[in-house]
Amino acid sequence: MSRSYARVARLRRFCTTYLFALAPLAAAVLWGGLYVVSMWGFESIPPVTLAFLRIAVGAAALLLVVRVRYPRRRFARRDLLGFVALGAVITASMTTQFLGTAMTTASQGSLITVLTPIFTILLGVTMLGERLTGRLVAGIVGALAGTVLVLTGQYDLSTLAGGSTPTIGIGMLLIASATWALYTVRGKPLIDRYSALETATYSTLAAVPMLAALVPLEVALTDASLRAIEPTPALVAAVLYLGVLGTAAAWYLWYKGMEYVDASVISAFFFAQPVVGGLLGATVLGEPLGPRFVLGGLVMAAGVYVVSTAES
C-alpha cells in the first residue's frame, strides 16, 4: 500500500514540476496561429474593434469557468485595483499589437515579437527580484538564436525596410511586446495570492470596457464602418479562435506556468510561437520550410529545454 502511495506522490510531483510548468508552451502553440487569423480578420473588422471582440469573447469564456470553480470569492481592495491595472496593460498591449500587426509585414511582426521574452526577463529581474543563472541565460540566448534563424529562413529580410507607416507599426509592436512582458510580471503577485485562472479572468474582464471605449474613437478617426461587417461563419470562427483559444485558454495557460516557475523561465516558451506559426503556414497554406527552419527549430527547442530545466 505504501508503495502505491509513493507512486502517486511521485506522479503528482512530476505533474507539478513539469506538466504545469510547461503550460506556457501550450499557450505559445495556441498563439502560433494568431498572426494569420488576425490578418484575415482585418479584412473585415478594424484592428481595435477586432481586439475588443477578442477580449470580450475571451473574458466571457473565462468568467463562465471561474464562476463554477470559485463561486464565492472576495478580493481585497488593493487586489481589485491590481486587476484594473492589469486590464489597462492588456488594453495597451492589445491595441498596439493589433494596430502594429495591421501596419507591418509578417516578417516584421514575427521578429519584433520575439523581443517579448527579453523584456520579460528584464522586468522579472528588476520588479520581482528573480535571479539569472548562467544556465538560464544560455538557454534564452540559444532559444533566441534558434528563433531568429527560423524567421530569417522563413521571410525575406528585405521586407524589414519600409516607409513611415511600417516604422509606426514596428514602434507599436515594440510597445505591445513590452506591455505583454509587463502583464506577465505584474500578474505574479496576484497569481500567488489567488490563482492563475482568477488573475487571467478578472484582468481580462477589466480590459473589456477600456477597449470598448476605443471602438467609437477608431470609427471616428478612420473610415471604418461597423455596419459593413458581415458576420460570416468564417469570420465568426476567426473571432472565436482569437477569443476562446488565443485569449481565454492561452492566457490561463501562460499564467498557470507562473504558479510553478519564475517569469524569466516561462518567457522562453514564447520563442515557440513563430515556429508553430511557420508549421501552420506550411500545413494550412502550403508555404515552404527550408533547412534553416528545421535547424533553427532544433536550436530553439534545445534552448527552451535548457531554460525549462534551469530550476530543477
Image (spheres, rainbow, N blue to C red):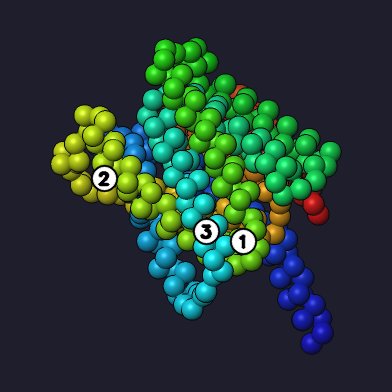
In which quadrant is the N terminus drawn? bottom right
- Camera-side mark, 3 or 2: 3
Instruction: Count neighbours of disc 1 (C-alpha within 10 A) and say few if under 14, some if 14 to 19, many if 20 or more.
Output: some
Q: Is residue 24 left or right of residue 12?
A: left
Residue 291 visible in the shown view: no
Query: Which residue is at 29% across, 42% downward?
Result: 215
Q: Are marks 3 and 2 in contact (CB under 8 Å)?
A: no
SS state under label 2: helix
Residue that badge 1 annotates: 191
Query: Which residue is at 51% across, 75% downward?
Result: 73
Q: Which of the pair 292/69 is nearer the observer? A: 69
Q: Position of residue 81 (x, y in %)?
A: 52, 58
Is the residue 92 above or below the residue 12 in the image? above
Residue that badge 2 annotates: 234
Amino acid at circle 1: Ile
Q: Position of residue 290 (x, y in %)?
A: 55, 24
Q: CA distance from mark 1 to mark 2?
A: 35 Å
Query: Which residue is at 38% across, 49% downward?
Result: 210
Amino acid at circle 3: Leu
- Mark 3 or 2 closer to N-term? 3
Q: Which of the pair 40/180 is nearer the observer? A: 180
Amino acid at circle 2: Ala
Query: Which residue is at 57% across, 36% downward?
Result: 178
Q: CA distance from mark 3 to mark 2?
A: 38 Å
Residue that badge 3 annotates: 81
Instruction: Count neighbours of disc 3 (C-alpha within 10 A) and say few if under 14, some if 14 to 19, many if 20 or more.
Output: some
SS state under label 3: helix
Q: Position of residue 182 (x, y in %)?
A: 59, 44
Q: Are marks 1 and 3 in contact (CB under 8 Å)?
A: no
